[in-house]
């Protein structure tokens, strides 16, 4: 080769060498590994070298020499300058960030097109959820669902459909929302659930909200109300005393109004009925503690077990004559009663308070009172409660009339 040709080749080689710029994509050939397990690469057409730490290959330091081989060529992005061009390893390079850049470009295109992306939730942090969309994305707590969510941990590991709210690749900022999609999914699920629910069905749900008047149960897209009176057979002052948000419950459907999207439910009607084994709990002659639940003109209904009320007829309240039960009893009062009779089949329990009280020394006044009572029974209208008591009018006054006659 002549001197002229050699000079020409050298000039062409020098002209082909271009300056390395931060942010550009280059090709790098793996030349060796340093003591820190970083790959030393030669940057194509530059005459300079760069380093690629293991993490910039998405590898651990002890993995790099197993996965990366001398002679391999990679597309890399220039991160920063770490020395002069004449020194070996003068640039920091990364494959990981190049892949992230490609992801950012794809996400930007989807954002501009209004497309929905999918990403798994990798972490629950203060204020929201972190997702892996190829790059780190964040869902603020207010954008996770279309209703308040007390515990975001339930979303960890789930893959969610997400709307892109804000994107700024230079700041690694990607804000996402699941709220709109959750609302659409919930509406579709609500229609399907309402179309399937039938009064009398026993279904499973989850406690969504608690109020002073009841509990709202999520049945899958639609919330049904369990009124406080339908939670248990015993009295419940506050639903929060016996239920917790997120608790799984079994409920009976009482009514469904698809147009108003209202569903009435009962928990207590899925429980063992209080009268089912009453004859095993109580027998004639037993003395029980009870609570006066209701007062009527003919007697007092006393609850002796949760959901089990027995009747103390007015004639069984006191040895003294009383015109009405509320002369001596008040609703909510604790009393002791003696069981006069048990009729499990008809859900009837006859009770007495006066049977546990000492009789007056003289019965004369009582006899006169009984005659007065007989006249009042014949002329007085007895108001029965609206619900079935298990007692007939004859049961309430007939036996008393027979005794007095």
Image: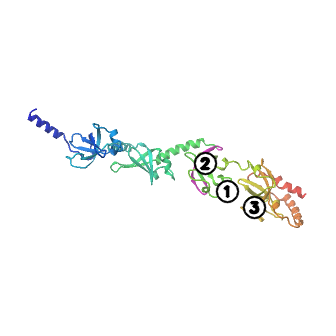
Is disc 1 in contact with disc 3, using a CB cutoff of under 8 Å?
no
* 206 in the magenta segment: yes
Mark 3 Cα shell of 10 Å, populated few (<14), some (14-19), many (≥20): some
Please give the label number shown on residue 306: none
Label 3 sits on a secondary structure element that is strand
Instruction: Please provide percent x and percent y for residue 198.
Output: 63, 43
**Circle nearer the N terminus (3, 2):** 2
Label 1 sits on a secondary structure element that is loop
Label 2 sits on a secondary structure element that is strand
Instruction: Please provide percent x and percent y for residue 258.
Output: 59, 45
Q: Residue furthest left?
A: 3
The residue singled out by tag 3 in the image is 335
Mark 2 Cα shell of 10 Å, populated few (<14), some (14-19), many (≥20): some
* 273 in the magenta segment: no
Identify which residue is drawn at 87% across, 56% down.
Answer: 401
Instruction: Please provide percent x and percent y for residue 167.
Output: 37, 48
**Circle nearer the N terminus (1, 3):** 1
Identify which residue is drawn at 32% across, 40% down.
Answer: 65
Q: Distance between the residues labelled 2 and 1?
A: 19 Å
Which quadrant holds residue 364?
bottom right
Identify which residue is drawn at 64% across, 49% down.
Answer: 267
Please give the label number shown on residue 249: 2
Give the magenta-colored segment's residue range: 199-214
């Amino acid at each position: 080769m002549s001197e002229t040709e050699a000079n020409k080749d050298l000039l062409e080689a020098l002209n082909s060498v271009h300056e390395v710029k931060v942010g550009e994509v280059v090709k790098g050939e793996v030349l060796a590994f340093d003591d820190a397990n970083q790959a030393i690469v030669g940057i194509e057409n530059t005459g300079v070298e760069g380093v690629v730490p293991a993490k910039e290959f998405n590898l651990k330091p002890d993995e790099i020499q197993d996965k990366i081989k001398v002679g391999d060529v990679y597309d890399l992005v220039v991160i920063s300058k770490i020395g002069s061009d004449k020194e070996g390893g003068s640039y920091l390079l990364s494959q990981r960030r190049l892949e992230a850049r490609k992801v950012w470009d794809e996400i930007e295109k989807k954002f501009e097109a209004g497309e929905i992306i999918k990403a798994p939730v990798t972490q629950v942090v203060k204020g929201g959820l972190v997702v892996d969309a190829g790059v780190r994305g964040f869902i603020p707590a207010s954008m996770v669902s279309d209703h308040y969510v007390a515990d975001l941990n339930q979303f960890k590991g789930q893959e969610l459909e997400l709307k892109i709210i804000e994107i700024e690749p230079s700041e690694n900022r990607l804000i996402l929302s699941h709220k709109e999609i959750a609302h659409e999914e919930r509406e579709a699920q609500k229609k399907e659930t309402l179309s399937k629910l039938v009064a009398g069905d026993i279904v499973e749900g989850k406690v969504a909200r608690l109020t002073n008047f009841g509990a709202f149960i999520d049945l899958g897209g639609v919330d049904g109300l369990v009124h406080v009176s339908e939670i248990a057979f015993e009295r419940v002052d506050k639903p929060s005393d016996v239920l917790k948000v997120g608790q799984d419950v079994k409920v009976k459907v009482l009514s469904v109004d698809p147009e108003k999207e209202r569903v009435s439910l009962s928990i207590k009607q899925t429980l063992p009925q209080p009268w089912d084994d009453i004859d095993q709990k109580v027998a004639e002659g037993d003395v029980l503690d009870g609570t006066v639940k209701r007062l009527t003109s003919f007697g007092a209904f006393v609850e002796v077990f949760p959901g089990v009320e027995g009747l103390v007829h007015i004639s069984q309240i006191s040895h003294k004559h009383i015109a009405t039960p509320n002369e001596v009893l008040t609703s909510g009062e604790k009393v002791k009663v003696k069981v006069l009779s048990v009729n499990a089949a008809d859900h009837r329990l006859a009770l007495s308070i006066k049977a546990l009280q000492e009789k007056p020394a003289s019965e004369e006044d009582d006899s006169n009172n009984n005659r007065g009572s007989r006249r009042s029974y014949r002329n007085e209208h007895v108001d029965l409660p609206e619900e079935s008591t298990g007692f007939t009018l004859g049961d309430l006054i007939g036996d008393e009339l027979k005794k007095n006659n």
